[in-house]
Amino acid sequence: MKMNLPNKLTVLRLCLVPVILIVGMLPETVIPFYVSCVLCAVLFIGTSVTDMLDGKIARRDNLITDFGKFLDPVADKFMVIGTLFVILYKFENLRLLMIFTLIIVVFRELAVTSMRLVVSTGEGIVVAANSLGKIKTVSQVVAISTVFLEPVVQLIAEFIVEACKGVSVSWPTNVVPLTWITMIFSLFMTIWSGVNYLKSYWKYLDPEK
């Protein structure tokens, strides 16, 4: 099957998801913790860039296809949910937050996807991404990237302090303020955008049909 460039980028994004899972879940004897964090961050940010590029290229060059309409949101959901499972496995200090996050994200995506399917097939209405949905996606990318990179930044800061002052310091592993701030904002946007979608298109979900 011949695919255009946007569809190839979408397939690439989908193929990178298991790579992130493998890199993130390999034991530290194989890949050291901080190296794994950097690799996961680079891979995840790379997959997020393909998400931005495939849509932009498809709209610019009029390369929108049914295959892309189907696979693009699927790849996005696999990318985010798969990476959240890596974080759940890898970061014990964030386990409770990640369980709550996964529940919210999965339920939101199931609800919105089901609503899109019913509305588009029953009413012939295309449920397009709105500004809240786009902000939600960006906030998730920022939050997940922060989870992986904040421990690395803390390690670099420890080395700098030790090199400059000759004092050995150790940042508490459970103190990750940027992770909490970005993840809570991401959860807020996930809930808000989901409720907004349901509220906007609920009128098309006729219980008598």
Image (cartoon, rainbow, N blue to C red):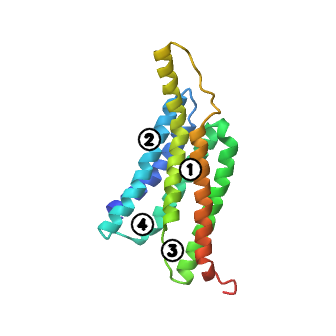
Instruction: Rate crowding at label 3 as few (under 14), some (14 to 19) or many (20 or more) other CA atoms within 10 Å.
Output: some
Residue name at image x 48 percent, y 61 percent? 134
- C-alpha separation, residue under disc 4 versus residue under disc 1: 20 Å
Q: Nearer the viewer, residue 192 or 118?
A: 192
Q: Which residue is mark 1?
A: 82
Q: Which residue is mark 2?
A: 42
Q: Nearer the viewer, residue 169 or 9?
A: 169
Question: In the rendered structure, which amino acid carries the disc numbered 2?
Answer: Val
Instruction: Give the number of the disc on residue 127.
Output: 3
Residue name at image x 54 percent, y 84 percent? 123
Sequence-wise first label, 4 or 1: 4
Instruction: Rate crowding at label 4 as few (under 14), some (14 to 19) or many (20 or more) other CA atoms within 10 Å.
Output: many
Viewer-nearest of discs 4 and 2: 2
Instruction: Rate crowding at label 2 as few (under 14), some (14 to 19) or many (20 or more) other CA atoms within 10 Å.
Output: some
Seen as rendered, the residue at the extreme bottom is 208
Sequence-wise first label, 4 or 2: 2
Question: In the rendered structure, which amino acid carries the disc numbered 1?
Answer: Gly
Sequence-wise first label, 2 or 1: 2
* Quarter of image, res 53: bottom left
- C-alpha separation, residue under disc 4 versus residue under disc 3: 15 Å
